[in-house]
Amino acid sequence: MYNKKYLGILTVLTGVGFMLLFTMFWACSSDTIGPIMVEGDLDDPVFTAVRSDLDDMVDSIIHNIHNPLTNPWGFPIDSSILDDPDNDIWWGPLNPEDSADYGYSDGWHTMYVVHLTASGSEIFYDSMAFLINGRPLPNSFSGIDEIKYRGSYALDNSSANEDVSMGFITRVDINDVDTYVASAGGTGEIITTRSYSQYGSDITEQFDFDITFSDIELTRNYLNDWDHYSRIDGQIQSDLTYTVSTTNGDDTNIMQQDWIIDITLNGNIAEIIATCGNIRWTFDHNL
């Protein structure tokens, strides 16, 4: 599952020529690692090239940690209700070309949904288990103390200016659901690829986030059950591999950066440290 509100802000590294790309990658390459850590400028092109995708990653992984608590799927579900344009279930409404399939097996509620558009497709494959004392429930989820979520999302979209593909996999285990402070741990991976032409060259960017988190605490808003949380606390760590391939005629240049992202969740703020080479950028992100 991927939070759709972020699909509209997938950005392209526009206005960047080859020399600037070269400078950016040299400044952040492993060859520049030294004994002294330098604080980076938030307006540095080295950082701004990854900032938007980094912000999206934080929002998306937190969304996928919290969203299972709200059961937006309405499991168990009759997938035919997705045809209703007035329903508010996550994947709906379905267009005539779309498809949805719900199933339940061995404790897991699953939904496979395909959305087709003129420019591409979205595919969701979500699985949920709702448990009491380790026992999964086929229905009637009152009193559950544990939720397990396994989500997969794939996007392909083409336009006159760029081609975008994305894969997002999430694995989340949530405990203490029957209290006011739930705890979550898990992993995620987001791979985004953009291809476009610029200055006579064909450019492909890829962002590969490998995410881990544990001991995440969500404090429930007592007025709204788990539909909202009053704060979220804990640590998220991600490795980011950022690769740019530039092809001009028969010549192809591939440049790669390796980043370490450390995130401290503090209420409604994510305090982020992004490190590449011996340069460290520190900033806050509102959740």
Image: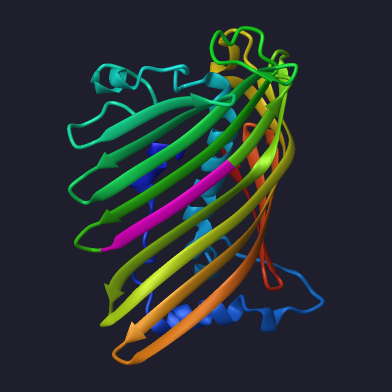
Q: Residue furthest front?
A: 106
In depth, the one of 236 and 166 nearer the eye is 166
Where 245 sits versus 187, above or below?
A: below
Give the magenta range: 162-170
x, y percent for residue 272? 66, 50
Q: Nearer the viewer, residue 3 or 279?
A: 3
Q: Is residue 16 left or right of residue 50?
A: left
> On the image, which quarter does residue 28 sit in?
bottom right
**14 sits to left or right of 257:** left
Q: Residue at x 28, y 34 (%)?
A: 99
Q: Residue furthest bottom?
A: 250
- Please provide percent x and percent y for residue 140: 55, 8
Q: At which x and y percent is residue 188? A: 60, 47
| Residue 165 painted magenta | yes
Q: Residue at x 49, y 69 (%)?
A: 45
Look at the image and tell me in which quarter the C terminus lies.
top right
- Tell me: 221 left or right of 183: left
Could you tell me which residue is drawn at 62 percent across and 79 percent down? 29
